[in-house]
Amino acid sequence: MQETSDAAITALNGTHFAIPAPVLDLECMIAPTQTGGIYYTPPSDDFSRPGRMWWSVPADVSEFNTWREKTTVYHEGVPGHHLQCGQAVFARDTLNTWRRLACWVSGHGEGWALYAERLMADLGFMEDDGDRLGMLDAQRMRAARVVLDIGVHLGLPAPEKWRGGATDPRWDAEKAWAFLSANVNMPASFVRFELDRYLGWPGQAPSYKVGQRLWEQTRDAARAKAEGRGETFDVRTFHERALGLGSVGLDVLRDALA
């Protein structure tokens, strides 16, 4: 994780992004918990504590497939959450303390991280067949959890395939477990962690995909507008301006970059 993260920062800084010096440091850590999942914590206000990427490894997991996880490093690190959050913390001259350190809009933040994964593929960082398959596999998982979230929390009927002979056709935890296990290529411990998260956090999983779509649409609209004026679209400037806003609602993001 650390080697992949460091290589991404070195390759992207000064080419596709202008990364502030304090944000160049990202520590990859094994989490003290063993629940499963990978997550990110932003740097402290003065950067005395750097941004950190944490891997919470279940006790029964001892083997890892790097092809599956490379896209996650880009999601949590650079150009994902670390660049996004670190740049906001650094923007002391333009953002207030609440927006720098406390505000978090899930659709904006998680949407950017999924956008960052696709961006790295577009920039040629996922050309290895295994790494690209890992990225697509992660996209499949994120699509599956949207179905699960909407079905469970709206009490909708599950497809016959996932009912397991239950008399009640509506989505529930048991049907969701069968569905997720069949559509997520992870050890059971990780899948259980993910399912518990979705069952207890309505709307969080769809926010990723809604946000990703809006980030992509906003960038494409900005490109079309520039080209309509006969100008060359500068995606680096677009990203710098967008991240400089800090965490905002998706409608605000779209209007601010229009």
Image (tube, rainbow, N blue to C red):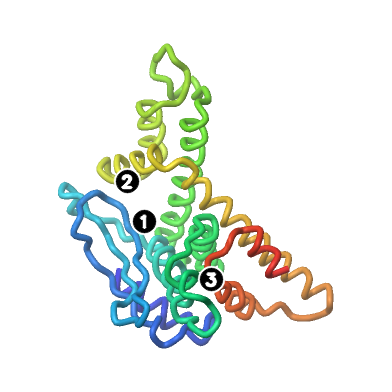
Residue 43 at x, y percent in the picture = 35, 74
Q: Earlier in the sequence, mark 2 or mark 1?
A: 1
Position of residue 220 relative to residue 142, above or below, is below
Q: Is residue 187 left or right of residue 219?
A: left
Q: Earlier in the sequence, mark 2 or mark 3?
A: 2
Farthest residue, direction front: 97
Residue ID for mark 2? 186
Instruction: Give residue 185's quadrant in the image.
Output: top left
Residue ID for mark 3? 246
| Secondary element at image label 1 | helix
Residue 154 at x, y percent in the picture = 52, 30
Farthest residue, direction right: 229
Instruction: Give residue 166's quadrant in the image.
Output: top left
Give the quarter of the figure containing the C terminus: bottom right
Q: Residues within 10 Å of mark 1 (few under 14, many from 20)?
A: some
Q: Is residue 245 left or right of residue 2?
A: right
Amino acid residing under circle 3:
Gly
Residue ID for mark 1? 68
| Secondary element at image label 2 | loop
